[in-house]
Image (spheres, rainbow, N blue to C red):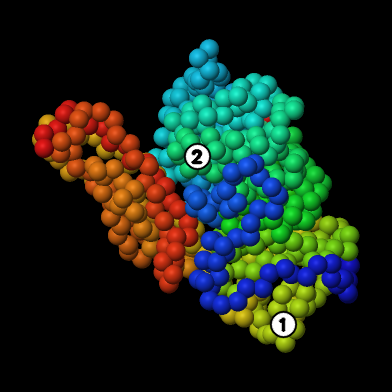
Amino acid sequence: MKDVRRARSRRLPAVFLAGAAFLALTLAAIMPARPQVPLPEGWPRTYHAEVDGLALTPPMGWYPWNAFGQEPQNEKLIKEIVDALVASGMKDAGYAYVGPDEGVCFSRGTDGKLTTNLARYPSGLRGLGDYIHAKGLRYALYTDAGTKTCSQAMPGTKGYEYEDMKAFADWRADYIKIDWCNTEGQDIVRTYAELGKAQRAAGRPVVHSLCSWGEGYPWTWAGAIGHMWRTTTDICGPGQADWARAVRIAFANEKLAEFAGPGRWNDPDMMVVGMPGLSEVQGRSLFSLWCMMASPLIAGNDLRAMDKPTIDILTNLEAIAVDQDPLGAQGHVVWNDGDVSLWAGKPLFDGSRAVAVFFQGRTKARLRIGWEEVGFAGSDELFVRNLWTHETTGPHAGGVDVSVGGGDVAFLRISKSKDFPIPPIVVADTVLVKLKSTGARPETLVGTVTVTNKGSHDLPPWRVDPRSLPQWLKVSITASGKTQTFVNTVSTAGLKKGAYHALVRADNVEPVSGKAMSAFYYDVDFEVGRNVRR
Ligand code: GLA
């Protein structure tokens, strides 16, 4: 048993937010600090997420590299994973972005254009995207900023930035991870900035995930270009988790806390929870640290073969609520005696705060957390919610006693109130509406997208700007309890035979100020079988 008696303060909690939760939430979403390092001439000095409203909370999803490496990534595997993501409850917990990593997806033809590797992806990369969208999930694809991807199996974007980002938009990618292999002689800021420009030119908003493993200090500039950036080397080799490496990565990533915020995230790599080589306790600890650091929660295990403890960890909504908190603060280490570290600096939207005690020793550590160490007043009487046992105790005066086993974590939420609300977690039944008309007489067709808030805190209403829609499409929104339905009405009168497409953007509007907070996108595909009379 280790008794930890004195806490040395290494860093004070950085952020003190006052006022109503909605006001704080709005400020955090629309008034982030500016990027610090000079960007290329003419580049906007704002955070990119202010434009597209994407990833204002850390992206959640699944990527294949940790479990599989390059083999056997193919359409069948990705579809099986997608089905498992839905069936396991991970979709309902907020995981949405899914797709192939470096899985030999495409090659470059003699005309310079990318073409799908149909041997591996027989439905085409667009077909795979449609499958994912029909499940209400988001499509993630991978490429590289250099001449070739890391294993050299696929072409990189160098010299083809605009063509390739257009191909990704045509395949309907919602998320693009861009690696930094084979980039000798390239300026990192200019290269990623050009790719960001190419994405905008392609016209489909995407989460831009930069993957330079910390090279070029992306946390100082990448928020103007994309939404998240890797801060370290890979967390493991394919197939086997590496506990020591994952812990080192967590301690490297926490030092970058000040650079993270809504729409701009430090990415300590895909998770290793549920992979061979990691115990349940270790998985729980790493998941807690990833949530404390507001890290993208991209699962990296084989979702088709999860045991119950793995599912319970990955779908713990109380832990996810910390990660997905709309204030977007990244927690960090307040003190560390070598074995025991106290993680705080994570104010949450309701005035509560998340705290983690991580014990790297072998037996058990006992300590007292004082309220002043974690951002409250010493005189406060506070309730403590254990985010793994789901028990609330208190009110406690001055602090709380905690004991933690070897490799384990105490993951707590501390509040003046007994209630611990879960912020909105948005889950859609589909993000692809497909409609088809066959007759020559005018008709009206309707298709819906239903969005359910899995959190306990209310989700403000969505709004679609009618001026952003093509003439043939109208969108109205109905609300019932935790569900909002987008009713898409299409009139065929006067339309010519052909395929029509619209990308609908809805903004979630803060009810007091009327400011847009986050955006939700979906596709409407409409096929007109014959010319239609007026
Ligand atoms: C790099 C990235 C990994 C993975 C591989 C693919 O190592 O950091 O996450 O994408 O490339 O080759």
Amino acid type, mark 2: Arg
Nearer-N-terminus badge (2/1): 2
Note whether ligand 1 is within 8 Å of mark 1.
no
Ligand number 1: quarter of image: top right
The numbered disc on residue 519 is: none
Tell me what residue is drawn at x 57 percent, y 62 percent. Answer: 31
The quadrant where residue 530 appears: top left
Instruction: Locate the N terminus and report the quarter of the image it occupies.
Output: bottom right
Label 2 packing within 10 angstroms: few (<14), some (14-19), many (20+): some
* Viewer-closest of 317 and 37: 37
Image coordinates for residue 390, horizontal then vertical, percent: 61, 68
Q: Which residue is mark 1?
A: 377
Tell me what residue is drawn at x 74 percent, y 78 percent. Answer: 371
Q: From the viewer's perspective, is residue 514 above or below residue 309? A: below
- In the image, taking residue 512 as reference, residue 357 lies left or right, namely right
> Is the C-beta separation of discs 2 and 1 under 8 Å?
no
Whether residue 262 appears in this view of the structure is yes
The quadrant where residue 145 appears: top right
- In the image, taking residue 442 as reference, residue 146 lies left or right, namely right
Whether residue 210 appears in this view of the structure is no
Image coordinates for residue 70, horizontal then vertical, percent: 64, 27
SS category of the residue bearing label 2:
helix
The numbered disc on residue 200 is: 2
